[in-house]
Amino acid sequence: MKGFKKIVALGVVATMVIGSSLTAFAAETTRDITTTDGTVAAAEQTVTGEATENYINKKVFKIVAPTTTWEAEVFDYITDPQGLIAETEAAAIGEVEIADDTGVFFKNKDEEGNLVSISSESDPLILTNKSTSGVKMAITVQLKEAPSDKYAKGYSTTADFSESGDDETGLYLGLTSTGNPLTPLDATAQSLTSYAKSAYNLFAVGYKDSAYTFEIPEDLDGEAPQYSFTINGALNRALADSAWYVVTDGKPLNVGAALAMPDIELKYTPTYVDARQCVAELGEEGITMWNEETPFAKEAAITAGSIKVNGIAVADVDKCDEDGNLVIPIASIYTALGITSTDEDAFDQLAERVQGVEATVGGIAMYANIG
C-alpha cells in the first residue's frame, strides 16, 4: 500500500506542474482601455463583426449522354433482303445471337460494350437528366437518302406493311422516344418534343473542399430520370430484287451492286426549363398542379399561353381554382398530344406519354414531373 500511495502522490505532482504550465502560457483574454491615471483612452470604442454569406446556386443543368463513338454507331443498321444473315448464321458478323429476322438488323451490345446479338430493334440511346428542373427535348428525325443509285420504293408506316399502300413500299423504320408516340420515319423531317423529367427531388446540400455543394448523392445517382430513343425496322421481302439491287439486263438472278439505303439522322436539343419546382398529378379529369411549399393564391392568374404538357401548348386556363390548384381539363390534353379521346385505351396512352407540365402561375414560372 505504501508503494501505491507514492505513485498516486507522484501523479498529483505531475498534474499540478502541467496545470501550472498551462496557466503560464494561456492567451490574453482582456485588455486595459484606460490610461494609468484612470481616464478613458478613447472617447469611443468600435467593435466590428464581419458578415459571411452562405449561398449556393441551386440551378443545375446537366445532361449525361453516351460517348460520341457509341452514339455514332447505335442506329447503324444492316438490310438483308435475300436472308443471307440467317442462312449463314451471321458468319459475316461473328458469334452472335440472331434475336429475330425482319430483314433489318441492328447490333445489340451488353453493358460492357460487347456485341451479343443482332435484332430488328436498336439498343436505346439513353440520356440521363441530372438537372434541377425538367429539360425540354426538341427532336428532329428523318431518313437521309443517297444522291444516286439509291433505294426508291418508299417507306412504310407500319412494321408489318399492313396499312393501305404499305405493301408497295419496301422499308420500315420507326422511332420510339420518351413521351412521344411511335413515329414512322421517311425522307421528310419530323419534329417531336417532350420533357426529360426533373431530378430536383434527388438533390441534397453538402459541404466538401471548403465549399457548399448541391448535387445528387452517390447512392441516389442511379435514380436520375432517363430519356431514351430506340429505332426498329423491317423489310418487305415480297418486293422484287430490283427494289434493293441493280439487276443486270433485267434478269432477276443477275444481281449487281446494292442500292444505297437511307441513313437515319436524329437531332435533339435539350433546353432547361427555368422554373420553380412544384407538384402535379394526372387523373381522369385532367392534370392538377399545385405548390406544397408556397401554395398558389386562391384563383391566381395563369399567364396566357404558358401551360405546356410535354412542352406542347395546351388550351388556356385563366386561373387557379378556389383551393389554389391549377386544373387542366383532360380534353385539352388529349387534343394537344394528338390522342383520340374516344379510343378505348386513350387514358392509358396519355398516362404512358405525359412526362411533365409547366405553367406561369401568379407571374411565377412553375414546373412539375408527372408520374
Image (cartoon, rainbow, N blue to C red):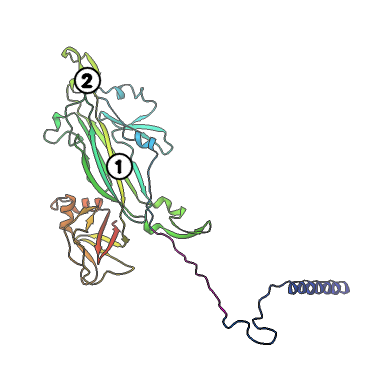
* Near-viewer residue (144 or 343): 144
On-image quarter of the C terminus: bottom left
Q: Amino acid at mark 1?
A: Phe
Q: Residue furthest right?
A: 2
Magenta segment includes 50: yes
Query: Considering depth in this image, is 117 or 126 the residue closer to the camera?
Result: 126
Find out whether residue 51 is within the magenta segment: yes
For mark 1, give the secondary structure.
Answer: strand
Do residues under tags 2 and 1 come within 8 Å of each other at their CB atoms?
no
Residue drawn at point x = 31 percent, y = 34 percent: 75
Please tell me which of labels 2 and 1 falls first in the chain. 1
Q: Is residue 23 above or below residue 220?
A: below
Does residue 209 lie above or below 260 as drawn? Answer: below
| Figure quadrant of residue 236 | top left
Quarter occupied by residue 269: top left
Q: Where does label 1 land, which residue?
A: 229
Q: Which residues are magenta?
A: 45-58
Label placed on residue 245: 2
Q: Quadrant location of residue 268?
A: top left
